[in-house]
Image (cartoon, rainbow, N blue to C red):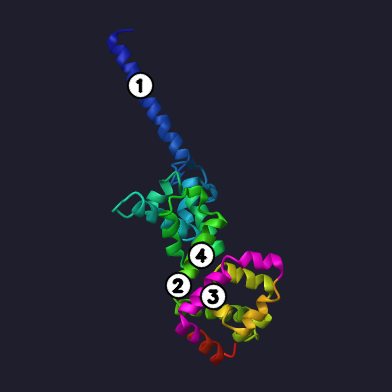
Amino acid sequence: MTKAGLKTSISDISKTCEWLSTMKQNDKPYKCEYCGSSYVREKTLFAHMCEKKRRALQKDEKRVRYGFYAFGRFYKLSAGNKKEKTYEDFCKSPYYNAFVKFGSFLNNVQPLYPEKYIDYVVTSGVKLDHWCRDEMYEKYAIELIQKEGVETALERSVMTMMEWADENDPAPWNHYFEHVSLNRAVWHIKDGKISPWLLLNCKSGKEMLSKFNDEQLNMIFHIVDPSHWALRFKRQLRDVELVKEVVKESSL
C-alpha cells in the first residue's frame, strides 16, 4: 500500500468511527444533564438517579438547607473565605454527606437558635464528624441557658407551653406543669425549651419536679443545677420578681 493509500485508509476509518459514535448517540437521545449518561427512552432518563441529580433535587429539603448553611459558615468562619459558597460548590464538595448528616441532626434536635449553634460548632475546633454528638449540643445548651436574659427565657418557655397546648387541645397552656407527661417535660428542660427561670420560681413547676424519678433528675441536673440558680436568683432579685408576676398573671 502506498503512503497516499495509507492516509486515505486512516481517514476512512476515522470517519467511520465518527459515524458510529453519532449513530450510537442517536440511538440514545435522552441524556442526563448531571452525569451525561444517555438512554433510549425518556421514561428511563426520568427514573435515572445519579448522585449529582440526587443532590440537585434535595436542595429544598430542610436537612440539606441546614447542611448548606453550615457549609457556608464553615468556609467563612474557619477558612476565611470572603466569597459566598454556592449550592453547586456544596454539591461538588467531598464533605457534602457529612454536612447533610449534621443538617439531619439539627432537624431532629431542633436546637435553640440553630444559626447560633452552627456558628458555635464551626468555631469550636471540633471535627465535623463529631458535630452530631449529643454532648456537643448539651454543652452549648447549658452555656446558653445559664447566660441568657430572663425575658428571652420566659418567652421561649411560654411558647413551648403553648405549642404543647395546641397539640393537646383542649388543655390550656398554663396547665402545662400539671398535665404534661414527665418524660416530655424532661426533654423540654434538657433541651432548654423550658427554662429554670420559670421552672424554679413557680409552685406548679417545683411540684412537677418532685414527681421526677432519680433517672429523670439526673438527666436534667446540669440544666437546673441548684447551686448555680440559687446564686443567680440571689443576685437578680428584680428578674425573679418579674417571673413571679408573670406566673401570677398567667395563673401558672
Residue at mark 2? 148
| Residue 178 percent location from the top left of the image | 67, 82
Residue drawn at (43%, 64%), measured in percent from left and top?
A: 116
User: Neighbour class for label 4 at 10 Å: few (<14), some, many (≥20)?
Assistant: many
- The nearer-to-camera label among 3 and 4 is 3
- The nearer-to-camera label among 1 and 2 is 2
Quick one: 40 or 161, which is closer to the camera? 161
- The nearer-to-camera label among 3 and 1 is 3
The amino acid type, in three-letter code, at marker 3 is Ala
Question: Judging from the image, what secondary structure is the residue with disc 1 in?
Answer: helix
Q: Which of the two labelled residues, at mark 4 and mark 1, occupies the earlier sequence position?
A: 1
Kindly give the residue lying farthest to the top in the view shown: 1
Question: Where does the magenta region start and end?
Answer: 213-241
Query: Residue 230: which numbered mark, if any?
Result: 3
117 vs 188: above or below: above
Q: Which of the two labelled residues, at mark 3 and mark 2, occupies the earlier sequence position?
A: 2
| Residue 30 percent location from the top left of the image | 46, 45
Residue 214 seen: yes
- The nearer-to-camera label among 4 and 1 is 4
Query: Residue 141: which numbered mark, if any?
Result: 4
Labels 2 & 4 near each other (Cβ < 8 A)? no
Q: Which of the two labelled residues, at mark 3 and mark 4, occupies the earlier sequence position?
A: 4
| Residue 193 percent location from the top left of the image | 55, 72
Q: Which of the two labelled residues, at mark 1 and mark 2, occupies the earlier sequence position?
A: 1
Question: Judging from the image, what secondary structure is the residue with disc 3 in?
Answer: helix
Question: Judging from the image, what secondary structure is the residue with disc 4 in?
Answer: helix
Quadrant showing the N terminus: top left
User: Neighbour class for label 1 at 10 Å: few (<14), some, many (≥20)?
Assistant: few
Residue at mark 1? 12
Q: How far apart are the two marked residues, 3 and 2, measured between alpha carbons?
A: 16 Å
The amino acid type, in three-letter code, at marker 2 is Glu
Q: How far apart are the two marked residues, 2 and 4, measured between alpha carbons?
A: 10 Å
